[in-house]
Amino acid sequence: MKARVIVTLKDGILDPQGKAIEGALKSLGIDGIDSVRQGKIFEMELATADRTAAAGMLRGACEKLLANQVIENFQVELL
Amino acid sequence: MNAAIILFPGSNRERDAIRAIEKVTGKKPSLVWHGETALPAGTDLVLLPGGFSYGDYLRCGAIAARAPVMDAVRAHAARGGLVLGICNGFQIMVEAGLLPGVLMRNANLRFVCRMQHLTVERNDTPFTSHYAKGQVIKVAIAHGEGNYEADAETIRRLEGDSRVAFRYSNARGVIGGGANPNGSTNAIAGIYSENFRVLGLMPHPENLIDPLVGGIDGRGLFEGVAGFTRAA
């Protein structure tokens, strides 16, 4: 089974990289984007086919390492 | 004083730390590989040096914070042992939960590498007894992710308990504004744990111990720690 983990900055956390990208898009003349927040995507191949077990295991992986919950939220998608 | 310096893949300031400790205490610190599960017996001070552990992959300090040796470092801190984290060492500490908050990308997105003034916020801790309260010291900074942030409640608690160790200032001791190199909340350059035995800071006091390389303002920190362990 494949899985995807998406880690994003929490609301209200300053994202200077997102701001820089936002500025770069504007300077390229790409209009209509009000704001940009940068995050991370992890694509994974899982050994298990058990969706409940996989979801629990990936939540643990996010809490332990993939996300810093002081500043980041995570979202687990089983594909 | 028995000091142990933890080495991670990508640490690169351990030699400066060895030199600073040796010069001040006359005793060579031991080097402990990150895969170890115990500290040398009788360790007084654990030092997490600067560098780019694991290439700053994922988040600065995130992977090093989960290394086997960090359980021993946490146990040492829980026993009231001294822990000092410098630069990447500070980033590792917040990732390991030894100190609150997080170090984010510098607000201006630039890696800053220059001399920087700091104010010493209090001088009644194991690390700062050789400074005066409010003293302005000049040390080096070199980081891209030194922007200290925490939620409002954590900042209130840190300030309320006077757990800010150093703040970025100009040469006259005026805090913040243009003297804040990275956008840190309240110009925070370093913080203590609740018991003041754990200190994390972004600047490099270990680089300023020899007049030959630009000053000795960092020396007081190591003299303070050495004095504290002698008295303990």
Image (cartoon, rainbow, N blue to C red):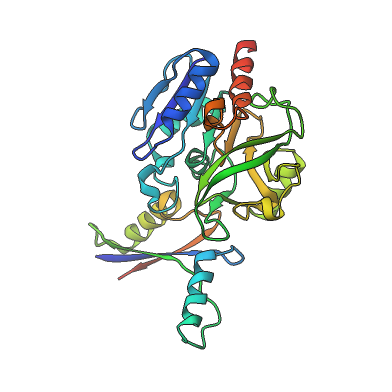
Q: Above or below — where is B48 with respect to B151? A: above
Using the image as rendered, state which of residue A74 and residue B120 is in the foreground. Answer: B120
Can residue B37 be seen by looking at this rendering? Answer: no
Q: Above or below — where is A36 with respect to B141? A: below
Can residue A70 be seen by looking at this rendering? Answer: yes
Q: Position of residue B125 (x, y in %)?
A: 69, 26
Q: Position of residue B58 (x, y in %)?
A: 39, 54
Q: Is residue B36 shown left or right of residue B122?
A: left
Which image quadrant for residue A4? bottom left
Q: Position of residue A22 (x, y in %)?
A: 51, 76
Q: Quadrant of the C terminus of chain B?
A: top right
Q: Is residue B102 shown left or right of residue B173?
A: left
Q: Position of residue A49 (x, y in %)?
A: 24, 62
Q: Residue furthest front?
A: B212
Using the image as rendered, state which of residue A15 and residue A44 is in the foreground. Answer: A15
Q: Above or below — where is B113 with respect to B6? A: below
Q: Is residue B68 shown left or right of residue B47?
A: left
Tell me which residue sits at (46%, 86%) in the image: A30
Q: Is residue B194 shown left or right of residue B65?
A: right
Total marks in image: 0
